[in-house]
Image: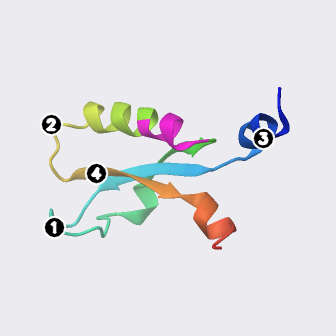
Amino acid sequence: MTSAQQSRESTQLLHLVFGGELKNLGGTEFRDPKSIDVVGVYPNYAAAHTAWRAKAQMTVDNAMTRYFIVHLHRFMEPS
């Protein structure tokens, strides 16, 4: 394995998946912040997207429920 491959594999690009019921369809304010569903933290976007999709599909019947992906690595190293 080359050093470039090792570097890519060791770089964590952490992502948070969470969601819950919103106050209104056009916003991002939660109806009850205490009941936010924290799905988990994932080591890359692909894994986070898979988790996000699964949760979003589970709640498809409730139009007020939304799930989000947050790029934690951007907060940890803004540059």
Q: Gap in Å between the C-alphas at discs 4 and 2?
A: 11 Å
Q: Which residue is mark 1?
A: 26
Are there few (<14), some (14-19), or many (20+) residues within 10 Å of tag 1? Answer: few
Q: Which residues are magenta?
A: 44-49
Residue situated in front as seen by the camera: 24 or 48: 48
Foreground label between 2 and 1: 1
Q: Which residue is mark 4?
A: 66
Are there few (<14), some (14-19), or many (20+) residues within 10 Å of tag 3? Answer: few
Q: Gap in Å between the C-alphas at discs 4 and 1?
A: 11 Å
**The disc label shown at residue 56, or none:** none
Residue 59, percent from left and from top? 25, 37
Which residue type carries mark 3?
Answer: Ala
Per the picture, the main secondary structure of the magenta-coloured stretch is: helix
Residue 34, percent from left and from top? 45, 61
Earlier-in-chain disc, 2 versus 1: 1
Earlier-in-chain disc, 3 versus 2: 3
Q: Which residue is mark 2?
A: 61
Q: Gap in Å between the C-alphas at discs 3 and 1?
A: 43 Å
Earlier-in-chain disc, 3 versus 4: 3
**Is residue 45 a member of the stretch shown in magenta?**
yes
Instruction: Using residue 40 as the reference point, say whether residue 35 is left or right of it.
Output: left
Q: Gap in Å between the C-alphas at discs 2 and 1?
A: 17 Å
Would you say the residues marked 3 and 1 are in contact, meaning their CB atoms lie under 8 Å apart?
A: no
Residue situated in front as seen by the camera: 60 or 70: 70
